[in-house]
Structures are given as structure tokens and as C-alpha cells.
Image (spheres, rainbow, N blue to C red):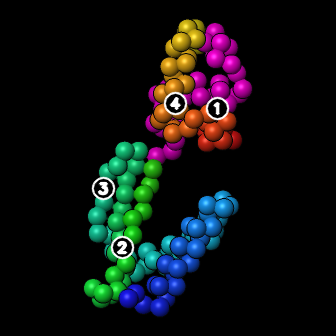
Amino acid sequence: MPGPALEQTLTNLRLLVRGARRRPPRLGEAAPLLARLLQSARTVAIESRAGGMAFRFEAGESPGARCLFTCVIQDSDDSRLTPSEREVAERLCEGRTLAQIARLRGVTINTVKSQVRQIFRKLDVETRVALVRRLCP
């Protein structure tokens, strides 16, 4: 089993993650816990993933007390969008209609509809409200 300090840190992180389902996570709570884990951890693997990178860490002194964890760092949401899609997303955040966006951009409404579908797919959202919550300040 991991040492008592490491075990307590992991328990606190698990509780924080479970609580994040009911309320937004507080980075100030997670940061010190992650810092404790990283102090004694060594990097086991680094791999490239779509939209970011994953780092695999190992903490613990003896083989029976090892704790493995993965940290995934993803690019910002809008970096996956093309410049045209980013512009359409910005106009949606402004509350413009598809017809208004098409006129502003000098394209057909079908082009805008297609771009909106691609934006939703890339950002894994299903509604404009979800898009606005994800991208817009």
C-alpha cells in the first residue's frame, strides 16, 4: 500500500473529483494535492493525443506502494477550429442568426449550417447554449 501521506493525498483528490460532479471544481483545492503527488513522482511515459498530450507518472517507493496516474493536457477548445469556423463561432456567441452570419461572411446559409455542425462535432456540444458556455466569456 502507498505511504499514509500519499494515500491521504489520493483520497483527497478522489473526493475532490467526486464533488466536481455536483459543483464546479476549485483549482485552488486541487493544486496543492497535485503538487504533493508530483514532488515524489517520476515520469513513466509521454504520449501525443488528439488535441493534446498525456503524461503518465508513478509515485511511491516500493513496488507494492506504487501509484500510477495520468495527466492530460489538451489544447484550448477553439484551437481545433479552422479560422472560418472560429469566426462563425464568434458570431454565434454574439447571438447572430445563421442568416445574419451568412450575409456578413458572404456565403450561403447552407455553408454556415455545415460549419456549425463541424463546430458542434469538434467541440462535442449539441446546442448553441452549450457552445456559448464553452467558448464565450
- The spot of residue 5 in percent (x, y) is 49, 88
Lower sequence index among marks 2 and 1: 2
- The spot of residue 52 in percent (x, y) is 40, 49
Residue at the location (67% across, 36% down)?
129
Q: In this view of the protein, can residue 104 be seen by the observer? A: no
- The spot of residue 28 in percent (x, y) is 63, 68
Looking at the rendered image, the quarter that the N terminus falls into is: bottom left
Lower sequence index among marks 4 and 3: 3
Lower sequence index among marks 1 and 4: 4
Quarter assignment of residue 106: top right
Which amino acid, mark 1? Arg
Lower sequence index among marks 4 and 2: 2
Quarter assignment of residue 127: top right
| In the image, residue 7 above or below residue 88 | below
In this view, the residue farthest toward the right is: 95
Q: Do the residues under discs 2 and 3 have CB atoms within 8 angstroms?
A: no
Q: Do the residues under discs 1 and 4 have CB atoms within 8 angstroms?
A: no
The residue identified by callout 2 is 68
Give residue 47's mark: 3
* Crowd tier of the residue under label 4, counting other residues whose Cα lies within 10 Å: few below 14, some 14–19, many 20 or above: many
Which amino acid, mark 3? Glu
* Crowd tier of the residue under label 3, counting other residues whose Cα lies within 10 Å: few below 14, some 14–19, many 20 or above: few
**In the image, is 117 to the left or to the right of 67?**
right
Residue at the location (68% across, 61% down)?
23
The residue identified by callout 4 is 119
Chief SS of the magenta region: helix
Nearest to the observer: residue 127 or residue 96: 127
| In the image, residue 69 above or below residue 113 | below
Which amino acid, mark 2? Leu
Q: Distance between the residues labelled 2 and 1?
A: 38 Å
Residue at the location (39% across, 65% down)?
70
Magenta region: which residues? 75-103
